Amino acid sequence: QKITRPQVAKMITSLTCELLFDLAPINDLTNQIKHGEPLSKQLVLIDPEEVFEQAKQLWQVWTQAKLNNYSPNLAPVIRQPEQLRNITSAQVYPTLTTLLNGRNTLRDLGVRMKRDAVQVARSLLPYLELGLVELITIPDLPIPVNQSVPRTPTKSTTRREPLIACVDDSILVCQTMKRLLTKT
């Protein structure tokens, strides 16, 4: 009871839109929704056609901003600090050096700055075109691991195991999943 149904629907919509947006540059990409047996209204959280339309609109805004050669999944990093300092104000430069550290993607910066990725990318476009800022690929987050207690008391090292989350309101389902995925 920590998250509401509308919040879940919004998260699923947002993640699906982001995924579809990332697929948009692929040439000849099409979609087809097959309607089968109707699902319970409790299970249906999003409207697929609406999500496709939202992703399409996001891609159109991105391309209209002349950003289609860039990905919002890339992280900006300053490549020419002195030249950047010379063409920005004394107030702007420290902010840029803090934000453009190569650790946050354009999407991350948008969230951090409470702006959308298009606005962030558009504001950096002049610096990108001048070669003062570059967009780089950053690695995905590491796979979550469980730092478990050693199995035998004589070992002092900890063992790293993959972490798998089973989210269900039935303890029986979670226990069954645990038995299926482990040897216990």
Image (spheres, helix red, strand yellow):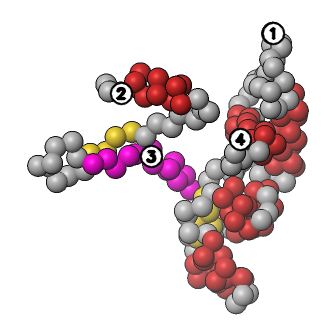
- Distance from disc 3 to disc 2, alpha carbons, whole Å, reads 17 Å
Q: Which amino acid, mark 1?
A: Glu
Is the C-beta separation of discs 3 and 2 under 8 Å?
no
Side of 165 relative to 148 (left or right)? right
Q: Mark number for residue 37?
A: 1
Distance in Å between CA atoms under marks 1 and 3: 36 Å
Residue matched to label 3: 144
Q: Nearer the viewer, mark 2 or mark 1?
A: 2
Question: Taking 113 as reference, is 139 above or below it?
Answer: above
Q: Residue at x 53, y 31 (%)?
A: 171
Question: Dots 1 and 3: beta carbons under 8 Å?
Answer: no
Q: Left of 165 or right of it: where is 104?
A: right
Q: Quadrant of residue 6?
A: top right
Residue 46 image position (x, y, % from top left): 82, 32
The label nearer to you, 1 versus 4, is 1
Dot label at residue 182:
2
- Magenta segment: 134-149
